[in-house]
Amino acid sequence: MKAKTRPLVAVIALLMTVAIHPGANSQEPPIQLSSGVQPDPLLVQGQSASGPDAGCGYMPTAAAQVVEIASQIPYLRFTASSDRGEATLLIEGPTGKFCAFADSYTGENPEISGMWAAGTYSIYIGNRQPGEHAYNLSISAQPE
């Protein structure tokens, strides 16, 4: 990479981080989890606003949902679906950012599962296409 392009790349990366930075931007109250999910699965519905292409689809600038985990949970599965288009799922928390696209293994719905450390997680629901899309978010402690 040429030296002249490095500052531009750094600025673009910074702008993308600011554009999708989580926090208290969610329109929904945080979901509090301490050892599991009740009811299981917990279903959340919403409307994702169109935002910039964040490398994980077109993401809104505010988190769709914030999940606060009080202590480590051995297994959680987050699954997003959309009534039209192809949903994408981005989760940002204390252990990093994780992105999932729809594929044939997950039944055409993006899914992120595994062990979750204590902390606050911002959940973004986007789409491979720009525009507003209705979505469903399922949170479960049961393996499929």
Image (cartoon, rainbow, N blue to C red):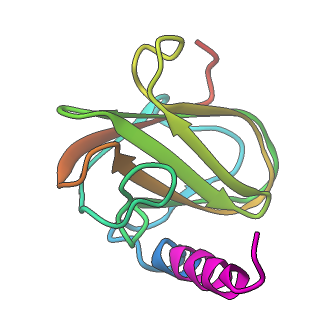
Quarter containing the N terminus = bottom right
Q: Is residue 48 magenta?
A: no
Q: 21 or 116: which is nearer to us? A: 21
Q: 61 or 2: which is nearer to us? A: 2
Residue 86 position by quadrant: top left
Residue at position x 49%, y 29% in the image: 40
Highlighted range, magenta: 1-16
Residue 113 in percent (x, y) is at: 66, 32
Residue 2 in percent (x, y) is at: 75, 76
Residue at position x 43%, y 65% in the image: 63
Q: 23 or 50: which is nearer to us? A: 50
In the image: residue 32, left or right of residue 84? right
Residue at position x 17%, y 54% in the image: 132
How many discs mark residues in the rendered view?
A: 0
Residue at position x 34%, y 42% in the image: 128
The secondary structure that dominates the magenta segment is helix
In the image: residue 70, left or right of residue 12? right
